[in-house]
Amino acid sequence: MSVSNYKSLIEREIQHHNFGTEPTSLYEPIRYLMGLGGKRMRPLLVLMAYSLFKKSVKQAVPYAVAVEAFHNFTLMHDDIMDNAPLRRGNATVHEKWNVNTAILSGDVMLVKVYAMFLQLKLDVLKPVLKAFNTCAAEVCEGQQWDMEFETMNRVTVEQYINMIRQKTAVLLGFSLELGGILAGASKTDCKALREFGINIGIGFQLMDDLLDAYADPKKFGKQAGGDIIANKKTFLLITALEQANKQQRTELQRWLQAKKFNKQTKIKAVKNIFDELQIRGLTESKIKQYFDKGFNQLEKVEGNSEAKKILKAFTEELIGRQF
């Protein structure tokens, strides 16, 4: 079965799952956000990991959608915290409705994720919930670190990598591990799948940082230069501050401390310093480092060779997104 077939199964399951009915204002935002599409990377990884060990993936589809629901729950709340106007090129939930509705819809969305997992057989339920709870707590820890970094004078590259591991990468790791657990894979294979996911997850978040600064906003689906405007301590900014000369560092600090500024002027000025320091190339090298680590873990996994090729090709295609 191809990736497009997997995605069709996921979309069909999402369309058939109404999440709840009354009050409509509580559940409609969930259906709205889930219906905005996106890459569906996490549920696809669940199914592709499952296919390494089982021929038919249909039994795993509801649990793949549970992972997508959890991911969208985090996005709904992240968008509030980031005051983001757009998500996948459309109005965010708190912009379309209001902040209080977005908070409450996100809360019930997480409850519904547990309800979806409770359909599992008892022998699989405990390891799945244990892995999910560990993952979910780390996602929250990573988000908190991300917010704390905003007020910290200095953040190291090591601290930043650990933050994105928690905030973003562990969910990719869990998605792959979940596919393995559901398919009855060995603990060794499940661990390798998790490590594969975590490493590519770090790579993808670093790529996301790079795309925020350099991508076409129409393709990216989010505000271009949003991280620069918000003074987000991304790998790009942290590395620039570490490698800048006195003049460049002074200029960067001036923009970081500015209270009133023209957004486009700030983006252009900061990107000029990035270009002077070859930050784009350094980030691309770091991205490759983590993808290579991930693929080395994937090679350790037993399972169907054709299914493994599909999983690897899918990951490589995502790496090749155009700027």
Image (spheres, helix red, strand yellow):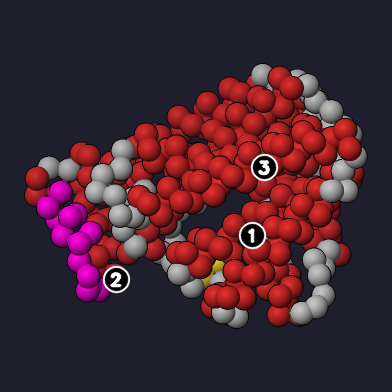
Image-quadrant location for residue 309: top right
Q: Which residue is mark 2?
A: 263
Q: Which tag, 3 or 2, sits closer to the chain's start? A: 3
Q: Report, in whole angstroms, how far the alpha carbon at label 3 lies from the one at label 2.
A: 39 Å
Q: Report, in whole angstroms, how far the alpha carbon at label 3 lies from the one at label 1.
A: 15 Å
Q: Which residue: 82% across, 75% down?
A: 21
Q: How many marks?
A: 3
Label 2: element kind: helix
Q: Which residue: 74% across, 73% down?
A: 27
Residue 100 visible here: yes
Q: Which tag, 3 or 1, sits closer to the chain's start? A: 1
In the figure, 160 relative to 105: above or below?
Answer: above
Residue 307 visible here: no
In the figure, 13 relative to 43: above or below?
Answer: below
Q: Residues within 10 Å of mark 2 (few under 14, many from 20)?
A: few
Q: Which mark is residue 213?
A: none
Q: Report, in whole angstroms, how far the alpha carbon at label 1 lies from the one at label 2.
A: 29 Å
- Predominant secondary structure in magenta? helix
Task: Tell me which segment is drawn in magenta.
Answer: 249-263
| Residue 62 drawn in magenta | no
Q: Which mark is residue 73?
A: 1
Which percent across, then down, holds residue 69?
Answer: 71, 57
Q: Which residue is mark 3?
A: 133
